[in-house]
Amino acid sequence: MSKGKRLVYVSEDLLREVMEVARSEGKSLGVFVEESLRLALSAEGVGYSPKEAAELLEVTHANRILGGAFVPLDVFNHLVRVAYRSGRKKLKEIWYESGVLHGKYLKERFENPVEAFKAFLEAARWDLSEVEVKEEDDAVKLRCFSTILTKEGTEILLKYLEGALHSMGYKIIKSDHMRGMIILEFKR
Amino acid sequence: MKVKRKTLFAREDLANRLSIIAKQHGYTLYNLVNEILELAIQAEDAGINLRRIFEESWILKTAKRDGFILGFESLWYDMADMAYEKDKDEAIKRWFEAGVWLAKRYASAGIEDPFETFKRNLEAYTWNVPEFTIEKGEKTVSVRIISPRFSESYTILYSAFLEGALEAFGYKTSSKEVSVGVIRLKAVGKEVDVEG
C-alpha cells in the first residue's frame, strides 16, 4: 500500500544540514527524514521526547565507552556497606578514580561537560531524586539529594563527584554532605 | 531574527502521529520535527548509531523499574571483591535474594510469559557481557555467560543471582560450572525428578 505524503516545515538552516548528513550517509533526503521520524516515534513509544532521547543518547553512549553495567540496588547497597567496612579508604579511592576517568571523558567530548555530567547522573543514578547544577561565571554549584541513598553511598558518591569535577579542571571551594545530600561548590 | 522555513514531504502517517504527540506536549509539529532532525544530526556528528540508541532506549527505563542501578563495571568488580573477601556467605546470600526478588517481580506481574520477559530484559541489562544466553527447554533452563572482564568473586556472585532467579521461577540447579568469567548453569523444573 502506498503511503500518502504530507508537507512539513523545517528551518532552512537545519534543512541544509540535514541534506549534508543524508548525502554523507548515502541516503536521499526523504529516506533520512523518514528514518529519523520513525526512530523518534519508537522512542516516544517508550516515553522519551526527542530532548530526553538526546540526553539518553549521550548517557548510553558514554556508558558503552566507559564500561557501564547494571547491578540491583539492594546488591549495590550491600556491596557499598561491606566494602566500606572492610576498606573505606580504598573504596573512596576507587570511586574517586572512577570519577576522574568519567570527568576526563566528558571534558574531552562535550562542550559543556558539567551539563553532560548532570544528565548522566539523572539518567543513570535514579536513586538520586534531585540533581541540580548551577554555573555562575567560573564557579559551579552541584546539589544532589536522595531519600534512599545510604550514608556510605553518599560518601562514595561525593568522592566520585569530586573526582569528576577535579578532572574537568575545577577545585572545591565548599563541600557539605550528610546522608542523602551533597552540596558542592567548585571553581575553575 | 525571523527563521526562514522550507517545506519537505514526510510520510503522512508518521507526520500525523507526530502531530498528535506534538499537541500532547504543547509543541507545534514544526518544533517537534526540527528537534528530531537536530537530534539526528547531533548523533551523526558524534558518530553515534541513533537507531541502536532508540531501539535500546527502553533499557534504562525498564532497568530502573526493576531496581537496577547503572555504574561503571570496574567499580562493581572491585566492590564485589571487597565484599566477598569480607563475608563470602553474606555476599552470596544477598545476590541470591536479589535474583529471587527480581524473578518474583516478573512472576507476579500478570504478564503473559514472565520468564521470557525476564530473560529478554536481563540479556539487555548485561550489555557489557559479550556472551549471555538463557535457553529454556520444555522443563529445563540452561544459562551460559562468558565475560572475560568479570572478576572471580563477581562471577560467583552473579551465578548466585541467577540461581536465585531460577529458583523463584520454579527451577532447581542440576549442574553448575563457575570459573573466572564463565558461568554455565543447568536447571530443571522442581516437579521433575532429577534422577529420573
Image: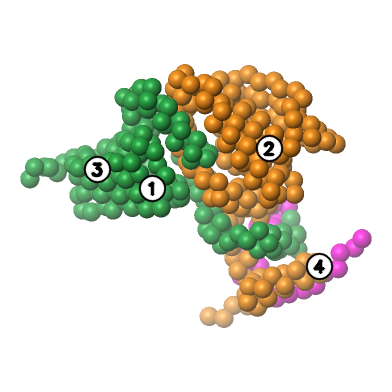
Element carrying mark 2:
helix
User: Marks 1/2: CA distance?
Assistant: 30 Å
Structural crowding at the residue carrying mark 2, measured as other residues with C-alpha within 10 Å and reported as few (<14), some (14–19) or many (≥20): many
Q: Amino acid at mark 4?
A: Asp
Q: Image quadrant of residue A128?
A: top right
Query: Which disc is residue B147 wearing?
Result: 1
Vertical relation: B196 (above or below) B5: above
Letter of the chain shown orange in the rendering: A
Q: Earlier in the sequence, mark 1 or mark 3?
A: 1
Report the mark closest to the observer, 1 or 2. 2
Question: Does residue B70 appear anywhere in the picture?
Answer: no
Structural crowding at the residue carrying mark 1, measured as other residues with C-alpha within 10 Å and reported as few (<14), some (14–19) or many (≥20): some
Indicate the position of residue A94 as horizontal and vertical percent values.
54, 31
User: Marks 1/4: CA distance?
Assistant: 46 Å
Which chain does the residue under circle 1 lie in? B
Q: Image quadrant of residue A33?
A: bottom right
User: Marks 3/4: CA distance?
Assistant: 59 Å
Indicate the position of residue B56 as horizontal and vertical percent values.
52, 54
- Name the residue located 25 percent from the left edge and 48 percent from the top edge: B141
Q: Which residue does the numbered mark 2 point to in the structure image?
A: A167
Q: Which residue does the numbered mark 4 point to in the structure image?
A: A13
Q: Earlier in the sequence, mark 4 or mark 2?
A: 4
